[in-house]
Image (cartoon, rainbow, N blue to C red):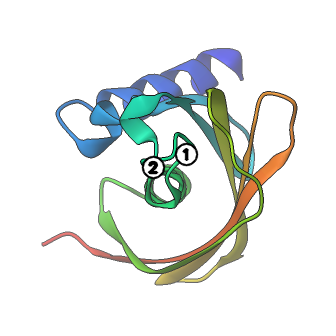
Amino acid sequence: MDGYKDKILKVCNASSKNTMMETLEIEYIDVGENFLIAKMPVTPKVHQPDGVLHGGASVALAESVGSMASFVFLDGQKLFVRGLEISANHVKSIREGFVYAKATIVHKGRTTQLWHIRITDDEDNLISLCKLTTISLPRT
């Protein structure tokens, strides 16, 4: 499984080149049977003016990991994935360190998927709780 896991993570991270994910330094770090985890450093690059993590950066992290999870767990060669809706509840602020987003599948339909995404800090404190709905459509 480790070789397979490494291959999936390598593909996920390679797909981030020259994208917003690369700009935000999002890195995919773990994958399992029904989840994908990414991390993002909390630096001034993703701060609000008062020095805490910007909620928009958290949402970008959540949508990135959820959409990539859809790609991983569906047939990404035959389908393309787009986000339909995302919601986020920000419950704690953070100024530095890393945040980790774990996307777990709640519903895997033929065309729509529902993802639960927990964003936590280095001590596993909940920072944001997100819900993402994606759609997968045939590549033409």
Mark 1 vs mark 2: give the one in front: 2
- Local packing at callout 2 (Cα closer than 10 Å; few below 14, some 14-19, many 20+) is some
- In the rendering, at what x and y percent does residue 34 appear? 73, 53
Marks 1 and 2 close (CB-CB < 8 Å)? yes
- In the rendering, at what x and y percent does residue 76 appear? 37, 55
Quickly name the residue at label 2. 48
- The N terminus is located in which quarter? top right
Q: Among all residues in the image, which is located at the extreme top?
A: 3
Give the residue drawn at x 45%, y 49%: 48
Secondary structure found at label 1: loop
Give the residue drawn at x 77%, y 62%: 91
- In the rendering, at what x and y percent does residue 71 appear? 44, 55
Q: Is 56 on the left-hand or right-hand side of 119?
A: left
Give the residue drawn at x 30%, y 66%: 80
Q: CA distance from mark 1 to mark 2?
A: 6 Å
Q: Quadrant of residue 114?
A: bottom right
Residue 132 circle label: none
Name the foreground residue: 88 vs 111.
88
Q: Quadrant of residue 45?
A: top left
- The C terminus is located in which quarter? bottom left
Name the foreground residue: 12 vs 91.
91
Give the residue drawn at x 86%, y 37%: 124
Residue type for callout 1: Leu
Please tell me which of labels 1 and 2 falls first in the chain: 2
Quickly name the residue at label 1. 53
Residue type for callout 2: Gln
